[in-house]
Image: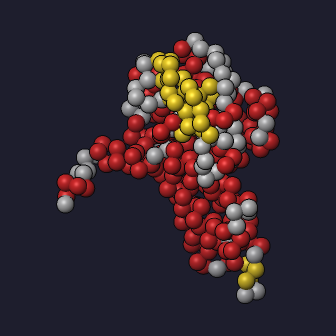
Amino acid sequence: MRFALTEDQVALRDAVRAPLATGDWSAVAATGVFAAMTDLGLDETDLVPVLEEVGYAAVALPVTATAFVAAPLLAALGDDRGPRVAIAGPGGLTPFGGHADLILHLDGGAARIGGARTAASTVDTSLDAVVSVAGEVLTGDPALVGAAAARAALGHAAELVGLGRRMLELTVGYVKQRQQFGAPVGSFQAVKHQLADAYLGLEFARPAVLAAAWALREGVDAGPAVDGAVVLAADAAHAMSRAAIQCHGAIGYTVEYELHHYAKRAWALAALATPGDRLDALATTIGLPDPEELT
């Protein structure tokens, strides 16, 4: 099976690129993204390319949480609260919770409305994160809650691929211009190999994310596909950030440099997506023994 974008999906992706770059909520809303999975009748496979662009731009808004997770869940429940919705992660840590109208908790087999919020410090300060306490139960429907939780994880994976792509482009542009020993550093074999390996990781992750979106759309057991997509995307983004910082040399370690904006967003999203737990789940799925049982 070939997981590739259709012409319509490419057109939608390209249409949202400029509004996302502005970081303006109204401009993004004008594209129809927040109604894509409700009024417009689009599905997970249509939104994944858009979410990759959200990551590419490192948008400091809960676009993915609102459009991809909350909108279809709230529509299914007939609940129209909250134009800006953030999704709580492990321990109630909620990216963009500081300026969200509504926070959703999707753990414990139920969807709950977030209550009290406490400001939280994260490696990426643009996340405006808070720690939210779960309150009122919105629904305990396992199908709805499970689908929403899977979309939240897949949203992180798609954004991580976009972030990796942005870091790759920044780094390739830099090593083409930076001169050392009378030649661009990008002409050195060690630099080429690092970036080629990082690029390969992103190219493996992208179709895995699309495959997981297809599994969600088709209503099959999407758990392993989503877990695999998260693991591959998190690993690829992490490898890309390491290669990007190293290939930039000294400037790559300067926190004010643009690269750090994307690297820190990738580190934060990867932590929220819990790839370690998902890797354990995949090991269980394929019948690998617990490492403790081998000692």
| Outermost residue to the bottom | 181
Towards the viewer: 69 or 2: 69
Quadrant position of the C terminus in the picture: bottom left
**In the displayed structure image, the side of residue 37 where residue 284 appears, left or right:** left
Counting labels gives: 0
Residue at left offset 67%, top offset 49%: 125
Colour scheme of the rendered structure: secondary structure
Residue at left offset 64%, top offset 71%: 247
| Outermost residue to the top | 78
Residue 32, quarter of picture: top right
Reply above or below: 237 against 215.
below
Reply above or below: 211 against 77.
below
* Residue 24 seen in the figure: yes
Residue 14, quarter of picture: top right
Residue at left offset 77%, top offset 40%: 23
Residue 206 image offset from top left, x and y in percent: 55, 48
Residue 29 image offset from top left, x and y in percent: 75, 28
Towards the viewer: 133 or 86: 133
* Residue 6 seen in the figure: no
Towards the viewer: 114 or 28: 114
Residue 197 image offset from top left, x and y in percent: 54, 66
**In the displayed structure image, the side of residue 54 where residue 294 appears, left or right:** left
Residue 200 image offset from top left, x and y in percent: 54, 60
Residue at left offset 64%, top offset 79%: 188
Reply above or below: 128 against 41.
below
Residue 59, quarter of picture: top right
Towards the viewer: 205 or 271: 271
Reply above or below: 277 against 190.
above
